[in-house]
Amino acid sequence: MGVRVVLCCVGVCLPMLADEGHQHSVPGRLGRVRFSNSCSRAVQPAFNRAVALLHSFWYEEAEKAFAGIAASEPACGMAQWGVAMSNYHPLWAPPTAAELKRGAEAAARAAAAGAATSRERDYIAAIALFYKDSARLNHRARALAYEQAVERLHRTYPGDSEAAIFYALALLGTAPPEDKQYANQKKAAAILNGLLRANPGHPGISHYLIHSMDYPALAELGLSAARNYAKIAPDSPHALHMPSHIFTRLGRWDDSIRSNLASAESAGRHVQRTKPGAGSFDQLHAMDYLAYAWLQKGQDAKAKQVLDDMLRIRKLDLDNFAAAYAFAAIPARYTLERRRWSDAAALTLHPPAFPWRSSRFAEALVIFARGLGAARTGDNTAANRELQQLAAIQREITGAAGYDWATQVGIQHRSLQAWIAQAGGRHDEAVRLMRAAADLEDATDKHPVTPGAVLPARELLGDLLLELERPAEALPEFEAVLKQSPNRWNALAGAVRSAQLAGDELKARVWYAKLAVLAESAEPKRQAQARELRQLARMTAR
């Protein structure tokens, strides 16, 4: 019942599915993959399908598919390679203890089973390096070891497109977060573009091209891949969702909404077949992007439907980091984007039984929203309490494997400090802290799990400067946000107001014209907000 409701929230009410006659739990339109291997001819279609699942990050189903091949053909060492690959998620999060154990055991079984060709043995050896010495080596060291091994694989077998594709993914998984020139991403894109003409239907090529270009400076270059991937693998919920990464970067909200509607529907169908009564983490992931897009279009009621249906979900197909992020981000976005500070101050974690201790970075989103809500409503006692919780979480996760979530929590901590200082009348301190948070956020890149910060730090800096009646200083802050995140409603509104109050009539008109386009499809309250800004422009002009 919960899944049916969630799908209704995005405007697609699916019938309850009683389709028990399917041969596979995953439909077959997953793209075209031809992974040459020495296993028997009988398992080749299943093997290619399993690799296609892997390339669309459908890791749970890929592991099942590879395990099924291994069960039917124990001598096929490459099937165990596939199980090991299914437990390493380069762009998501480090493996859990259970995933690390399953992957290491599969890599050992693959090596023991052996393979008929040196190429296959090199594939097996490469993934074994990721799991080797996991008690001694940290996640990044092992990811780099795998990347270097798969680079050797690519160079040793230059005609092997799969080796090239997996190397491109490994480059993305080890891209240094501080590199704003995006060297790894550009190198990966060059490899993938070189393969595209000969492999137009391969899911991994378009998928990884999107990830290569999921940055403001590169996003335009990812549009073609974004539009192709969903057509290549239409039965994959992730393939239907991934185009919205590029659409979000470009502020193409209608395209993002269509993409995530399709993804949510697909994920709902799958979970209804495999785990009736549960929600899907893929579905939640799409819902976060969907709520974000509705809010930027000024359609708060539709964002509220997403939130309400999220709150009905009590159990999931997989309690992973993406589900944790969506559970925390959707309610935080809904309150903060609408500047409902008292509602933000009252947020609680949902669902209570979720293993939040393993996802403290996500829990921090709700704590930040509560603290900011408290500070903006004058309750500095409560705000300081939330500030202390953020500091504790930052200390706890500093140095953790994978993405640097500690820095993201640090940005939230400084932002909340700034608004506590502002509420206490320490205006210069507030500006200094808020600017430091904005500069730190500019120096980092978002994790692929999120469409963007629940509130950009530089947008909060603009809000602060406006509150201090410094519109000429606020305007470039809002403009900087819009350069990185085009068509954000609040940044556009802030830019219009700042320009008007600073007496820059030309910029006020330019930014208002963009806001007016969003307002055309906004709900009445948001349209009224836009009209107020237009009226202020006329008063300023007089």
Image (spheres, rainbow, N blue to C red):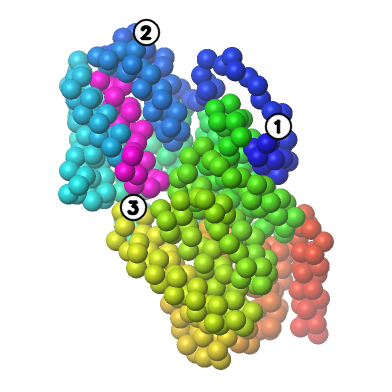
Label 2 Cα neighbours within 10 Å, binned few <14 / some 14-19 / many ≥20: few
Give the CA separation, mark 1 to mark 2.
36 Å
The amino acid at mark 2 is Ala
Asked whether the beta carbons under mark 1 and mark 2 sit within 8 Å of each other, the answer is: no
Residues 96 and 172: in front is 96
**Kind of element beneath mark 1:** loop
**Kind of element beneath mark 2:** helix
Name the mark on residue 42: 2
Asked whether the beta carbons under mark 3 and mark 2 sit within 8 Å of each other, the answer is: no
Residue found at x 29% / y 34%? 103
Earlier-in-chain disc, 1 versus 3: 1
Quadrant of the image containing the C terminus: bottom right
The amino acid at mark 3 is Gly
What residue is disc 3 on? 402
Q: Position of residue 514 (x, y in %)?
A: 69, 62
- Looking at the rendered image, the disc whose residue lies closer to the viewer, 1 or 2, is 1
What residue is disc 1 on? 14
Compared with 176, 510 (above or below) is below
Q: Position of residue 280 (x, y in %)?
A: 55, 39
